[in-house]
Image (cartoon, rainbow, N blue to C red):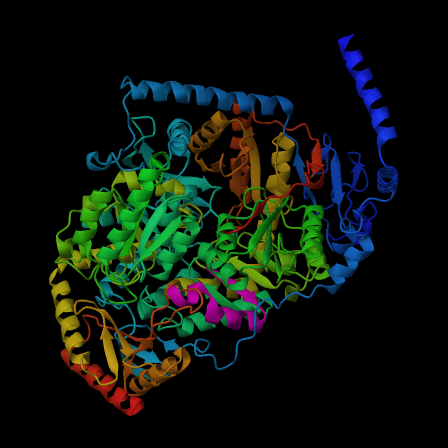
Amino acid sequence: MAASMGQQWVLVEMVQAFYEAPTYHLILEGILILWIIRLLFSKTYKLQERSDLTPKEKEELIEEWQPEPLVPPVSKDHPALNYNVVSGPPSHKITVNGKECINFASFNFLGLLDNERVKNAAQASLSKYGVGTCGPRGFYGTFDVHLELEERLAKFMRTEEAIIYSYGFATIASAIPAYSKRGDIVFVDEAACFAIQKGLQASRSNIKFFKHNDMADLERLLKEQEIEDQKNPRKARVTRRFIVVEGLYVNTGDVCHLPELVKLKYKYKVRIFLEESLSFGVLGEHGRGVTEHFGIKMDDIDLISANMENSLASIGGFCCGRSFVIDHQRLSGQGYCFSASLPPLLAAAAIEALNIMEENPGIFHVLQQKCKKMHTALKGIPGLRVIGQSLSPALHLQLEESTGTRDSDMRLLKEIVDYCMNRGIALTQARYLDKEEKYLPLPSIRVVVTVEQTDLELDKAASLIREAAESVLN
Amino acid sequence: MKRGPENLGGQPRANGCSFSKHGAGGGLKNGYVRGSAGADTHSQIHRIVHNGGLYKRPFNEAFEETPMLVAVLTYVGYGVLTLFGYLRDFLRYWKIEKCHHATDREEQLDFVPLYQDFENFYTRNLYMRIRDSWNRPICSVPGARVDMMERVSHDYNWTFKYTGKVIKDVINMGSYNYLGYTQNTGPFSEAASKVLSQYGVGVCSTRQEMGNLDKHEELETLVARFLGVESAMAYGMGFATNSMNIPALVGKGCLILSDELNHASLVLGARLSGATIRIFKHNNMQSLEKLLKDAIVYGQPRTHRPWKKILIVVEGVYSMEGSIVRLPEVIALKKKYKSYLYLDEAHSIGALGPSGRGVVDYFGLNPEDVDVMMGTFTKSFGAAGGYIGGKKELIDYLRVHSHSAVYATSLSPPVVEQIIASIKCIMGEDGTTIGKQRIQQLSENTRYFRRRLKEMGFIIYGNEDSPIIPLMLYMPAKIGAFGREMLKRHIAVVVVGFPATPIIESRARFCLSAAHTKEILDIALKELDEVGDLLQIKYSRHRLVPLLDRPFDETTYEETED
């Protein structure tokens, strides 16, 4: 009752208000009401216009679309298009573009590429197994030779387990994404090689680059992360952290500061992945790489990866470490699971190369001596700067002063390379994909020292490079 | 064997599918099945024609639906396994059951765990039970018969011990040795041996630096000639051929349309490229066309700019389904929508086509219509590595920009020689007809083996011409049982389960080879018949459905690299 009474009163008040209102107000309200009615009955905004194309319009769009060509044209004289042609084996003495040269370009550090013992082992394997494996490791592509090689590598590196890949590049590129996933954090050196960069990209992790070999910069990043972690401890508990470094950087010829890295590892609880493609079979008393060089325990490094394409002069790569770490790759390493296994003859060659390394530990000392000699000999060439430490078998020669553009620098260096090549020393420029590299190294000539090069040849190469630099750069 | 397109039955409907049945013993009875006509009396023959006018040869590809009861039992099986998994994890946690798996170092136990627990759960409790069916080591040429190392496990597959004994002459149904070129005697290995003693095994440099041998150039010229393309480039690893070259071809602002069952290497390559990836249903042309149309009409998401280019990525023969790509239709679509085609012939090169030139040859198409012809040397050629063939501009571009050419060591010379020798043999340039015979033998073996398996009542997937033959097992327990029973009978088979297949579609897979003689196949079939009865895996009710009639949902899965 009370409610209806209230309503009645409101109605009465409204009627009263209507009478009392001035005329202009009523006219105004009348117009407003008419406006509302008009709005209600007029067409609302036109949806059809922006949605739903007619089939004809779609066809027109399809007709209209012009894609870019699959690949842009490459000019015929692109410096990277016309490869050097090596006839015969790429060993110590090499025939490049028809000219006989001493090889200062291939990563055949221990001279095992041309070794008779290695060849014989491969021959024996070939006559037992043929060439291909016709299957991935999981599906009848595991040969006894693979098991033997894995065991030998693990033993040589003094780790629990090793796993082999059929391609050097795919080794670290598969190993990183096997552990590091989206949301994890990887601290990586700016000079890291392309295989590492691709592995990082495949992992979709958070990548933090620190300045090349700059431990203070790395620690700064680690500290930043620590502060970040304290803000969000729940997230920090599931975020894996890795440091990825190379033992001996292929792009700079520098050795990583492993002792400091190990300290940082325990301080900030980060795992270390070490790529040793260049240092395996080079550094250390027995050629075990950078860990042996610094006397670091293998167990302090979580994973070591290296290819068998340099010192071992075969094909493929391996990872080694504790079983807890390595075994995970047998189901998660993409390049391991989904690729055909390594041809047995290449595995047999790698085993024999390991035998030779174990039997002649003196070979590493010889290599070191030659590297030092070459390093000294190349120093002080006017116009050229030597990049890399004196124990690195791969040195870079950069222009002291850039001519302004990368292209013209490359052309100058090519002239030096050609000059030497015409006079019996085979050299190569370090090749990079300019647009793909995260931190593109400066153009350089890469000089590779091997045990097969005699002192005479080293001298000849150094003086020839000096001569070339003088004639080209002046 | 030969029948014009007009005989294929059904009227070709645009993007439709006509499905005609013929009674047993009818006049149109499978002309391409060799052997006795009476064999098929209990089965119905289905002919699937889809855009039939485009096909120059019959395209018979069918999949039998999973029987309902089997599907239910399979899920129950996984349920039981999971329950027991939790129970055993519980026991392990309280140290009642001995814990076998490796653990992190004491010093690093307070680090964030290196891998996730669920991955472990599956490995520990499901995979570990039947781990003996994989990674079986062999110690001979992976030919038609193979010697295997006997191994035993005393701790339920956590570790294996080699007894030192060799299981001799196991019939090999697992290796991708399609044309039987994996040999340790004969002209191929002799040629490889000669090159080995001249060149050594390694190269120690990349193609762009000092690793471009005359042998590599010889190989590339030959591959280009073999494929019928202008130019070709060879790489050291098949997997890397995909993962390191797709990023050179497409990038941001480009679209990749990828078959849902594409190989991991293609998926990785697509991801590394930074392009947008959209997935179409397996071999489903409606799904592909819809994606193509939408892509061009609506452009890139958010910005609505037109795509720079569209790359369709398909495989010739799919290694888990045994299906053959509907290439004539893919090419028609690609032309209509001005996109590019990347064809991965890992399993089809050498194995398909009257002259062994892969799926393009099989359908009698022009290799120029495929923009990127990719394939591997691992399978039919019995070697290792991969190649890309195509127009000269494409290959020149790859020579400059391919990640492999710049950063990866080039192919080993003896491996190159094996490839050269086997391709020459396939082409008949070695002066023999061995190549031709082997191709013929493989296709006969394929048809024979498929027909016999179907008659026995197994559910077989894929195209009748595909040398990869998946035999459905469904239940997880049968994966292990099948693998072990077959090995007991001296037959090596590949079994696959989740995650390589959908969870309920575990299967065994046979790879036929020209090296298999009829005698070998008959032994294998006899044993398979017995094992099939023993394990009750003859599920077939002979009701085939074409791939198109499998459930097709319109939603697409898109992946954008961030």
Q: Is residue B484 above or below residue A268?
A: above
> Closest to the observer: A238 or A328?
A238
Quarter occupied by residue B448: top right
| Residue B126 drawn at (x, y percent) | 42, 28
| Residue B124 drawn at (x, y percent) | 37, 29
Left or right: B195, with B235 as reference point: left
Res. A289 in view: no
Res. A437 in view: yes
Residue drawn 18% across and 79% down? A379
Quarter occupied by residue A217: bottom left
Q: Is residue A381 above or below residue B244?
A: below
B396 falls in the magenta region: yes
> Closest to the observer: B104 or B482?
B104
Number of callouts: 0
Q: Is residue A453 above or below residue B24?
A: below
The overriding secondary structure of the stretch rendered in magenta is helix
Magenta residues, start to end: B386-408
B376 falls in the magenta region: no
| Residue B481 drawn at (x, y percent) | 46, 27
> Closest to the observer: A152 or B423?
A152
| Residue B62 drawn at (x, y percent) | 68, 39
> Closest to the observer: B402 or B559?
B559
Left or right: A176, with A51 as reference point: left
